[in-house]
Image (tube, rainbow, N blue to C red):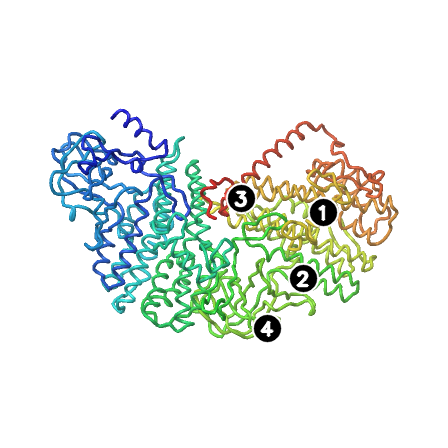
Amino acid sequence: FQDVKSAFEANYACMGIWCGVVGELFDDDMGVFYADIPFCSDSVFSEPNRLAGYLPDTNVLDHSVIDGDQLAIESALSTGDFGVAKSIYEDGGYSKSYAQVTVSPALSKGLPKGTPITGISKGSRAVFGTALESASAGASSIKIQYVVDESTAPCFVGGLAPDDQVQDGCLADGGVNVITINGEDDYFYSYDVDSDNKNARTIQGFSTGAQSKMFDDCPGCPYKDFEEFYNYYGEFDYANQWVTAALLGESTSFTNGNADFNIYGTAGRREAVKKGTAYMSVWMYVIRELEDAIDDCNVECTFDCNEDAVHAWDEAVAFYAGSEEGSDGSGDGALLYSLADKRCANFGTCGAGGDSVEGVAKTNLDIYAQFAAGQMNLNLGNCDAARVNKDRISELMAVPLVQGVYRYAHKIDNLNDSSEKSKAEGAVFAAAILPRLHACNSNSAQIVYNNMKVGAVSTSFQDVKSAFEANYACMGITCADVGNLYNSDANTFFTGISQCVDTSPLNLDRIAGYLPGTNVVDHSLIDLDQKAIEEQIKVGTAESFNVARKIYEEGGHSKSFAEITLDTALVNPVNKGTSVIGESADGAWVYGSVMADYESNTRDIKVQYTVDADNSRVCYVGGLPSDKVDTSGCLMEVGSITISGQGAFNYQANNQGYNKNARAIQGFSTAAQSKMYEDCPGCPYKDFKQYYDYYGEFDYANKWILAAAQGSSTSFKNGNADFTSYDFIGRGEAFKKGTAYMSVWMYVIRELEDAIDDCNVECDIDNCNEDAVHAWDEGVAFYTGSEEEKDGSGSGALLYSLADKRCANFRTCGPEGDSVSGTSNINIKIFSEFAAGQMNLNLGNCDAARVNKDRISELMGVPLVQGVLRYAHKIDSLADNSEKSKAEGAVFAAAILPRLHACSPGAAATVYENMKVGATSTSLSAVKSAFEKNLICMGMTGDDVGGVYDIDAGAFFLGAAPMNENKTSGGVNILGIVLGSVLGGVALIAMFGFVYMMKREKSGNPMFKNPDEVIA
């Protein structure tokens, strides 16, 4: 019998069963288990149950019952029994119960930690346990931790009141009792069931053990989140000190964030204790377990990856949810899962869309998606990917805390609830999140503390809200995550609450398919300036040209700002980017940020308006004509603003035209000397130097545009243009194409170069590479504009639009570059490089990003060459001698001649003589030959450029077929080019697959999921 039993028991785990479901043979006659049969002991004691939908890989049921301690504390507090609450907080009751027994005889050999031990319970049931600690041979005192699963009777003791203790699952005491160690060695034991059953896991211990477990003695120490809290409070056990002070009615002695509970009665202290245990002590320990999992992954991971890591991860989920939420989350818990569900009903953030007041919190759904993804990554040994999951979980765990602060600030201020209970709840929610806010902005944290602290004289809900909202991006949360306060009595959201607007949205709209890593919506609006210029030029009058020039010089849509004078000077310095909130003339909220660093005692400041994809109100001013100005999103002329960390200030506009634009197309050229030639780390930029060397002017684009606008001539070193012979039609083409294809064109390249400069100068292992990626994103925004829509199907006015227009003329549209409809093959290739460059910058691969930038620059030349050939063909082959066509040919030539000149001055001279303003004749053959011989030098192929295509005839025009890049002096390794292109394409596809997976992982929607782990 024993051989048969042992053979099965050794394989229970593999068979998916365990000792508890099989049970032990029971002697009905004697009413006890057969004494001569060793009790079964599992290597895996139970089948893990789901935790609110999450399927743990390991047994963490005993960890999850920590919510039993929380509920017991709350029960004791509800009757005002702070003494019992303190005992449970300090001594536990439900989790990690163990018995300390004296064995006889003394141990004959060493007892390793985790060794299985069995016995009989006080309720005459089998007891399964393990050695809590190692013991040496000869020891007589050992600690036995009770195994917890669905089949075992509990042993709930610790600090619980006697009437609340459950001892049916505790080892029996009195009489003669025997335990069996490791299924083979029997020992008599003695102990007292009342005094010798204790708990090795307590909510207090989560905080008192923090210094060792989160700051000093862990492989990844100090953990980032805990360090923020330690830096703020100045105490390792800050949560314990808060709870203990509230239990005793005393005060804390923190560096920041102190609380004096002497002023509170039972109601206030009760809230401070029960929310402090759950939302301060347990909250941080959840993050600790996630960090511990990643430590285990990095330190211990082998091919058999990753039992310890996954177990720690599972523990975190157990502590987050607790045992009372049930397997599907429909229960009634007392920890963080429960908090998120409560707050979503108050803020309309329940459900998959985060737009309901019923159901599971969107925060819980998002966190559980990260829990599942992190578990998978740890099982695969993807430690770095698991850290991404952990970081996102940590960010999302802050959402219910912020909601808690808002809920009670609103109650106190707007609903006039001055009860001690509400004030205490607001204070403890603030205490639980202030250190994270402080890490973003200490002034904002001070505003919240002053308004929400224990004993606050007054509370301003708006000041608290503004202080948090100014730091959402830094905290990794959004307006949509937090939601708006919901009035359940009226079944609608509370009125009179300012709309939240993310200053740097995490969920960013695509730019013609490209997903930016930063907010560059405001930059993309530069195409509206271009369109406004084109509208005025189309009118074709001296007055309209003056308006077009004014828009060119002063802008209108991008980087709008207000110049205002404060009635009272700043008390403290204000940093650039600090959030500002005010009102428009019709009473709508206006959001912005300080444009520069300002010292204390300053009164004149500039406030840049915040722009994002959801903005319905704008401030379009600058050089726009009066009928195009839109001030719905501008600050009123005289009013009040709130500056984050500073408070409210009355102000007045300091001049009549106080709303202006700090970004204009002219500035792209007039600032070129500084930004592209002299004052940048990588100066002079290669592409810009080619243009400066050719034209001999730093602001060559601006000089071309102004000459066209006013009908004058240029004074360049090469490539001059005399617009005195042109009417409005020719001048208009030179003007509007000069702004887009000369000024904006070069500035796109400048932003890509700036991104690489930022990467080389600023990149470090902890912060790689926000500035670089932002500059790169700006390059994409200026290339594309705002009107191309998310997928590129719109109708823009910049370089993306140009490439799509020209591909229809040259049959270079589509993925193969052989169609006359669809997206330009050039755009497809450029956007592939944009995506790859963004990834390289995120990874700190600066040199690789330069390769991407150089290829983009080469490809950006293609539509310009196509433009030259298109109008050379019109003028020569189709005998189109119109001023319009000649001017278009001239401006396309002006936009690309410096690059051709860098390859061959002679070829550039040929093209110039044939295409210049006032050219006496134009030869398509001569122009085409000049380019053809220099295609490889310019980084192009004949297939890139294509040929001038006759759609009606379905063939290329005679003499305008695609060029052959191999018509050049000197041998060229064609096979090498072809093979390089093929291999490069394969690498790029792999790279994009990696980028796509990274984005899916970061968004909480991993490509690879265990369907059992998806929360519906």
Residue that carries the numbered disc 1 in the rendered image: 804
Question: Is residue 103 placed above or below 520 in the rendered structure?
Answer: above
Q: Front-most of 661 and 991?
A: 991
Q: Which badge, 4 or 1, comes first in the chain's sequence?
A: 4
Residue 877 image position (x, y, % from top left): 87, 43
Is the residue marked by circle 1 packed among few (<14), some (14-19), or many (20+) residues within 10 Å? many
Q: Front-most of 855 and 288?
A: 288
Residue that carries the numbered disc 3 in the rendered image: 841
Label for residue 553?
2
The answer to whether residue 115 of the structure is visible from this angle is no
CB contact under 8 Å: marks 2 and 3: no
Q: Which residue lies furthest to the front in this view?
A: 29
Residue 754 image position (x, y, % from top left): 57, 48
Q: Given the image, on which type of amino acid does mark 2 rest? A: Glu
Callout count: 4
Q: How far apart are marks 2 and 3 (CA)?
A: 33 Å
Q: How far apart are marks 1 and 2 (CA)?
A: 28 Å
Where residue 21 sits, quadrant-wise, is top left
Q: Given the image, on which type of amino acid does mark 3 rest? A: Leu
Q: Is residue 193 left or right of residue 886?
A: left
Q: Which badge, 2 or 3, comes first in the chain's sequence?
A: 2
Residue that carries the numbered disc 4 in the rendered image: 655
The quarter in which the N terminus is drawn is top left
Q: Nearer the viewer, mark 1 or mark 2?
A: 1
Q: In this view, does 32 lie to the left or right of 316?
A: left
